[in-house]
Image (cartoon, rainbow, N blue to C red):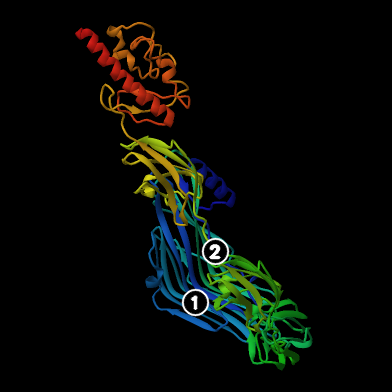
């Protein structure tokens, strides 16, 4: 037999944890009776809490058994009988147990008692035997008289060594095999017949064995592992409390409230028990979980709904029920219908969507609807900001004055008036200017029409007999749009703009025909400048060689410059004859579009073309002579 002191156990455990080779298992802590209530009793025939493991490598559990067999408590009275401990043990490692286990616990006003027993017990831990013929414990706690505790231990043997029952704590050791340790020893600290009593409680344990393993690691460190414990024949009890005094109710505040319930009531008196006092008001019992016991002399609760009238209020604990107090349920006052005293704004469009504030009193959040004309706006769409104010959005409605009322469960208010205003008639567009106001018959001139009321995507233009759809008109703003002219015969035509609101007054655009006789046969008026006549100096004499030079005589870059290219003699001064005076005129033999040409300029160009033709004929005649 080897004895190991507690100080050595601590030092060995510290070394084990420092090296990380082994882990520990906490010893079983058997609950005492301190937390038990008066009259409680408990009994446990067998409790195994044994665990031991190596930390590795490799980590492995080398012993394990965790089971509570035949475990009972009272109240209520209960008992257990396990005929074969082995079947109830469950999965274990290096632990076995057989035998019969019984337990019972009873509780009454006169006594509380716990009894447990293990008979023909045979068990092993790491191959070492623990046996006993009987291990019993009894704890008895009468309501009058002293508590008692008793145990019986018969033929106890631990690791093959007989242990004297009731003697001092014994220490028994045996060599065992544990993976990862050499010279491993299993030690049992054995306490028998532990019996304890106080004036109010008793505990008994027939057998309590604490187990530990010591050994040497592969690194040469001596370690100790607590493995846990085996307890058999345990019982405990607490003396029942004296017969309790029923509660008394002496006052109630307030003593009245609405039939809807929800009144917080304080009941005063004595004998109220926290968590165990219910209240009965009328025919309704409020459970203890809904009653707040602030002291043994005061409790609070909330009244349930109840019909109008006086009802009794009592408090009930495990000791009994108090005498009654009276609470009176008051019926609600007759509801007052709402009143409407003002409406802002009092008008809006027939399309609806106007946010309106109705003022008055008696408006109920979530329960106030509004009727406007023949349409009722449900309470869910009405915002009651206070009992005196609500808001809603008007629905669409024909033009005219309609009544507005508010309705709650109490009734309907008098009316206010809201006037639906019809939409203003749309204003047709107006056209006030057109630039340019002329262009070739071939079309393609980009024209800007100014005015007002132009609508993007909804404004078409009619020029002459041709309507340009809105998709081909660019509305740059409500006062300006652009479009391209279509082909059209020569002459002035009307130009109007049309929107869904109507059609504008006309502006005039003039389509200009091509000018015949130009070198390419398609000259057109095109452009603007200050003076197309300057630089046309016919000079003097007759120089036919240079007088008909179409290359320079029709110089579109500088206007109609007959200067040196067309010398028609002194009788034709193109410098003054082609001065249109109303804006520059540019000629081109390119066939390009022409803009911004006055009537005077057109006449001058026509005259110039005629003189040019005459000059050519005279030049031809002179050459013939």
Residue 406's image quarter? bottom right
The image shows residue 574, relative to residue 257, as above or below, that is: above
* Residue under label 2: 423
Visible residue check, residue 406? yes
Percent position (x, y) of residue 388?
71, 72
Q: Is residue 598 above or below residue 555?
A: below
Residue at image point 42% right, 46% down: 495
Which sits earlier in the primary sequence, circle 2 or circle 1? 1
Give the percent coordinates (x, y) of residue 227: 48, 56
Above or below residue 281? Residue 23 is above
Q: Tell me, yes or no, if residue 214 can be seen here.
A: no
Is residue 622 left or right of 377 when viewed as pictured?
left
Judged from the image, the secondary structure of the residue bearing numbered disc 2 is loop
- Residue occupied by mark 1: 117
Q: Residues within 10 Å of mark 1 (few under 14, many from 20)?
A: many
Task: Look at discs 2 and 1 and give the one toward the viewer.
Answer: 2
Answer left or right for 262 relative to 603: right
């Amino acid at each position: 037999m080897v004895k190991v002191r507690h100080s050595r156990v601590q030092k060995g455990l510290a070394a084990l944890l420092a090296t990380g080779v082994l882990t520990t298992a906490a010893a079983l802590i058997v609950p005492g009776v301190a937390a038990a209530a008066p009259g409680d009793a408990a009994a446990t025939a067998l409790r195994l809490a044994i665990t031991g493991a190596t930390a590795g490598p490799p980590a492995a559990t080398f012993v394990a058994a965790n089971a509570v067999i035949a475990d009972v408590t009272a109240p209520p009275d209960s008992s257990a009988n396990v005929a074969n401990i082995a079947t109830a043990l469950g999965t274990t490692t290096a632990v076995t147990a057989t035998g019969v286990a019984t337990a019972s616990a009873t509780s009454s006003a006169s006594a509380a008692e716990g009894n447990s027993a293990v008979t023909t017990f045979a068990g092993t831990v790491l191959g070492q035997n623990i046996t006993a013929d009987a291990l019993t414990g009894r704890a008895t706690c009468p309501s009058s008289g002293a508590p008692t505790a008793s145990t019986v231990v018969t033929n106890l043997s631990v690791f093959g060594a007989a242990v004297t029952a009731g003697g001092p704590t014994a220490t028994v050791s045996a060599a065992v095999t544990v993976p990862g340790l050499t010279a491993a020893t299993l030690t049992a600290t054995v306490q028998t017949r532990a019996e304890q009593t106080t004036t109010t409680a008793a505990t008994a344990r027939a057998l309590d064995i604490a187990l530990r393993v010591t050994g040497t690691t592969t690194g040469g460190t001596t370690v100790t592992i607590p493995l846990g414990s085996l307890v058999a024949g345990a019982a405990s009890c607490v003396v029942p409390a004296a017969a309790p005094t029923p509660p008394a109710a002496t006052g109630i505040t307030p003593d009245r409230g609405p039939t809807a319930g929800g009144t917080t009531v304080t009941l005063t008196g004595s004998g109220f028990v926290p968590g165990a006092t219910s209240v009965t008001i009328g025919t309704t019992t409020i459970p203890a979980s809904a009653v707040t016991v602030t002291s043994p002399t005061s409790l609070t609760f909330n009244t349930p709904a109840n019909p109008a009238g006086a009802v009794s209020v009592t408090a009930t604990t495990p000791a009994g029920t108090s005498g009654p107090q009276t609470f009176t349920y008051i019926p609600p006052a007759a509801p007052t219908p709402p009143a409407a005293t003002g409406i802002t704004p009092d008008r809006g469009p027939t399309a609806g969507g106007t946010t309106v504030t109705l003022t008055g009193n008696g408006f109920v959040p979530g329960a106030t609807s509004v009727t406007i004309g023949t349409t009722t706006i449900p309470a869910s769409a009405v915002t009651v900001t206070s009992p005196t104010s609500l808001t809603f959005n008007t629905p669409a409605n024909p033009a005219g004055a309609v009544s507005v009322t508010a309705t709650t469960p109490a009734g309907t208010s008098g009316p206010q008036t809201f006037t639906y205003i019809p939409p203003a008639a749309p204003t047709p567009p107006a056209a006030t200017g057109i630039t340019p106001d002329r262009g070739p018959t071939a079309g393609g001139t980009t024209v800007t029409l100014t005015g007002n009321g132009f609508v993007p995507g909804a404004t078409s233009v009619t020029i002459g007999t041709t309507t340009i759809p809105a998709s081909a008109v660019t509305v740059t703003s409500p006062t300006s749009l652009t479009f391209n002219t279509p082909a059209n015969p020569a002459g002035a035509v009307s130009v109007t703009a049309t929107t869904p609101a109507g059609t504008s007054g006309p502006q005039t655009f003039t389509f200009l025909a091509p000018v015949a006789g130009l070198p390419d046969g398609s000259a057109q008026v095109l452009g603007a400048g200050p003076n197309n006549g300057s630089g046309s100096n016919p000079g003097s004499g007759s120089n036919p060689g240079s007088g008909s030079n179409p290359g320079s005589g029709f110089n579109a870059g500088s206007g109609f410059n007959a200067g040196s290219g067309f010398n028609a003699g002194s009788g034709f001064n193109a410098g003054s004859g082609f001065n249109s005076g109303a804006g520059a005129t540019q000629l081109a033999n390119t066939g390009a579009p022409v803009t911004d040409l006055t009537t005077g300029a057109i006449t001058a160009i026509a005259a110039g073309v005629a003189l040019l033709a005459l000059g050519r004929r005279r030049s031809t005649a002179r050459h013939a002579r």
